[in-house]
Amino acid sequence: MTFSYDLGLALPELILAGAALLLLLWGAFQPRTGAAFTLAAMAALAAAAVAAATGPLGRGFAGGLVADQASAFAKVAIYTASAICVPLGQRWFERRGVHNFEFPVLILLAALGMGMMTSADDLISLYVGVELQSLALYVLAAMRRDDARASEAGLKYFVLGALSSGLLLYGASLIYGFAGSTLFADIAVAVKSGAGTGVLFGLVFLICGLAFKVSAAPFHMWTPDVYEGAPTPVVAFFAAAPKLAAMVLFARVLAEGFAGAIEQWSQVLVLIALASVAVGAFAGLAQRNLKRLWAYSSIANVGYAILGLAAGNAQGVQSMLVFMVLYMVDVTGFFACLAALSREGRDMETMDDMAGLFRERPGIALAMTVFSLSALGLPPFSGFWAKFYVFKAALGAGLAIPAVLGLVGSVVAAYYYLRLIKVMWFDPAPGATDAPPAEAQAIAIGLALFSFPLVMGALVVLDPLAAAAAAAFGLV
């Protein structure tokens, strides 16, 4: 293969890298950027999504990067979610007198890292993609330098992220030492030929590092504090797209590198999934801050996605992909609602702040109700179909008891979603809310329409695309 062929495979990443550099120069000479700057970042993400969907398929850079239907599926979803968050965040900061041109640039760099994660085909490109994404997210979390909570969130995220990077590197070094290669294909050969328990020990550390990135229990400790302290539109971004990127990387590592050890890693994933569902369901009951509440909700939902992956077959990977895309819609939409809400210039983030919202802002209240019912898993909202796919895959793989326990966790978590709906619809309002910004309101209502009723039509397209993406991993 020629170098030009390799560059063709990496075209989405090259578009994002070039756009990030150009926007960085633009912002350096004109710090108070306008709508054109935001549109340029969105255009770059759209161009990268088109390049991923229509570009060539294959392996390049000596096997370090792969472009297949799975990476194309994930990149289109990731870049779309990133493009939605650019105007949401940029306008949110500007309304608060913060003119940071770096926000769209950091979104582009994080999306670049996520794209590399979905295309990583060896341990080195895996680590480069994870770190590029993570470093951008650390800065985004602490974007409001005058806010003590945001600085604390960024610091906690960075310190605990360094721990997860250590776990990743230690696991990768063990795998390389016992398998003799960093390529997933070579590792798979070593596993099938009986490379020994050393490779499996390395896999456990690798799983722990990746579990941190998706905030799965017991590696979830950073999530509630970071969600609470980070700016709301930033949370909308890193609660959605990075989770999908990490889950696709999770699937690629396990399916391509350790397909010969499904029985071993499936057991580990089941334990992580059930722990995540339990922590998310029960710890969320005590939360009054909505950002912390949805942090625990995300922990539980990641548990469901991991349960689908634990099935160890193509149907399980397909269920995980469908689940994560539909979950991205719900979580982005909910935080778009929060970004649109304020009272006397103060952000509305607690359960008490939402009292009487339906009488004040019926459109946003309806959207938040849709997202809450969807996250609960009530039919016919998108969250129901997401969990339907996961439980169907788990039952098909003989994981009946974990599926039932996951369903019990969903019933427990229903309490805090229904409590929020009750507060919005029936409690008296403490005061008038400020007029919501047009862009946040439009994003929230548009995503709510996708969650219901447009999800039925979307599944007709999403289901076969997810099935084709799952088949790319080679599982039966």
Image (cartoon, rainbow, N blue to C red):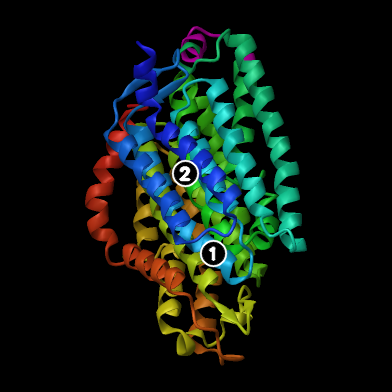
Q: Is residue 16 magenta?
A: no
Asked if the residues shown at circle 1 and circle 2 are in contact, with their CB atoms under 8 angstroms apart, the answer is: no
Residue at figure coordinates x 32%, y 36% from the top left: 51
Kind of residue at badge 2: Leu
Residue at figure coordinates x 61%, y 43% from the top left: 136
Viewport quadrant of the N terminus? top left
- Residue 197 seen: no
Residue at figure coordinates x 61%, y 81% from the top left: 353
- Residue named by callout 2: 244
- Residue 22 seen: yes
* Residue nearest the observer in this picture, 249 or 197: 249
- Residue named by callout 1: 413
Nearest to N terminus: mark 1 or mark 2: 2
Work out whether 392 lies above or below 51: below
24 relative position to 60: left or right? right
What crowding class fits label 1: few (fewer than 14 Cα within 10 Å), some (14-19), or many (20 or more)?
A: many
What crowding class fits label 2: few (fewer than 14 Cα within 10 Å), some (14-19), or many (20 or more)?
A: many
Work out whether 113 lies above or below 59: below
Kind of residue at badge 1: Ala
Start-end of magenta stretch? 187-198
Work out whether 396 lies above or below 27: above
- Comparing marks 1 and 2, which lies closer to the viewer? 2
Separation of residues labelled 1 and 2 (CA atoms): 22 Å
207 relative position to 403: left or right? right
Q: Which mark is residue 302?
A: none
Q: Position of residue 393 (x, y in %)?
A: 37, 42
Secondary structure of residue under mark 1: helix
